Image (cartoon, helix red, strand yellow):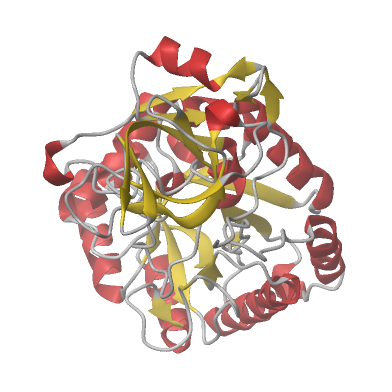
Amino acid sequence: MKALGPIPPGYAMIDGQLAIAGRTVSDLVAEAGSTPLFVYSAQHVRRRVEALRAAMPQRLALHFAVKANPFGPILSLMNELVDGFDIASGGELALVRAAGIDPGRISFAGPGKTDAELRAAVAAGVTLNLESEGEAERALAIAAEAGGTPKLAVRVNPDFDLKGSGMKMGGGAKPFGVDAERVPDLVRRIIAAGAEWCGFHIFAGSQSLDNDAIIDAHAETLRLAARLADQSGAALPKCNLGGGFGIPYFPGDEPIDLPQIGARLAEQFSVLPPSLADTRFCIELGRYLVGEAGIYLTRIVDRKVSHGETYLIVDGGLHHQLAASGNFGTVVRRNYPVAIATRYDAPVAEAANVVGCLCTPLDRLADKAGFPQAAVGDLVAVFCAGAYGASASPAQFLGHGPAAEMLT
């Protein structure tokens, strides 16, 4: 048998079933009316934000990366809990505006912003994290046409990356941000043009479980921000330190030590150079805030044996859970945390593959893992589904369409 990833803490069992926020999975599916279904726990999100607030320095603001989960009720919940929102498209701008989020709390990053997106962001008063000199000139021209003052920051392509990160966003040639050595000239251009200078966005990588690497990346980021501020000759109003806090997905993964990371960042804040004395700092987290708060529920529609192997075929699959299928950046496929949710207290009785309904061999949610004896009609739960599930999977593949979503 192949091991399954670790089930996140905080989930319960009622009458032998997995329970979320005091309700069984069968009850939740009955309310939704169908499977597949994403269920997000507001209680889990609140606990995670509380833990971050307790561990991190008070000076550090907390931003939510909308790309992790743009579900409307999640955005409304986050509006109560976090200090800012980071978006990466005009579509996300529309979603956060529809959720009633103050544009003054929104920053917009991402390469390839269109003129229409820049125009909408400038008109709304959103801070633009500029990814190139060309984007800066387009934003300035659009603001001049509209007779407004754009809020501009620079996304820096740092000369280092976040060690051990699942996706490296900095260091070397990248489509993201402005190479560090070119940043001072761009800052001076922004200020000379009369724009509102808003600071730096420095994002070195994501999904790291290495405490020391995250601590070192914070130190490197602060040193880089100070150096670039000095070279620019301008005070640094704000610095987004990026994110990078990972969650355990696979066998052997261990959670990060949040108090240790927070304590070390507080030490770093205590010895800031004069150029950063009045700078406001934030971190930008998505997966770490909502990833473990989500569960994907899908129903077994067939059970079959082929050449001695058992297959549990479900009505969902990679079109909703691309990452769990192993097709979202992983080199070697490993099992996510998966369980038979309606037999949550039953002992392991067999090795089985959980496969989706798509006509492709890539559609696998669990590979030769140990499960209780499951039957047609049972519900399968894929954990760690609160981030980059519904928002990062090809929902329209083979015409199956998106899964239902609910916040409970």
Quadrant in which residue 175 is drawn: bottom left
Q: Residue 308, position in %: x, y?
A: 37, 57
For the view shown, which residue lies furthest in the front direction? 308
Q: Nearer the viewer, residue 68 or 401?
A: 401
Q: Nearer the viewer, residue 310 or 119?
A: 310
For the view shown, which residue lies furthest in the left direction? 399
Q: Residue 26, position in %: x, y?
A: 50, 17
Q: Residue at x 26, y 41 (%)?
A: 91
Q: Residue at x 50, y 41 (%)?
A: 386
Quadrant in which residue 323 is drawn: bottom left
Q: Is residue 280 above or below residue 358?
A: below
Can residue 336 be seen in this snapshot?
no
Q: Is residue 90 above or below residue 81?
A: below
Can residue 193 be seen in this snapshot?
yes
**In what quadrant of the picture does the C terminus appear?**
top right
Q: Residue at x 57, y 72 (%)?
A: 234
**In what quadrant of the picture does the N terminus appear?**
bottom right
Q: Is residue 126 above or below residue 335?
A: above
Q: Residue 380, position in %: x, y?
A: 47, 35
Q: How many numbered tags mark residues here?
A: 0
Q: Nearer the viewer, residue 357 or 192?
A: 357
Q: Residue at x 65, y 21 (%)?
A: 21
Quadrant in which residue 300 is drawn: top left
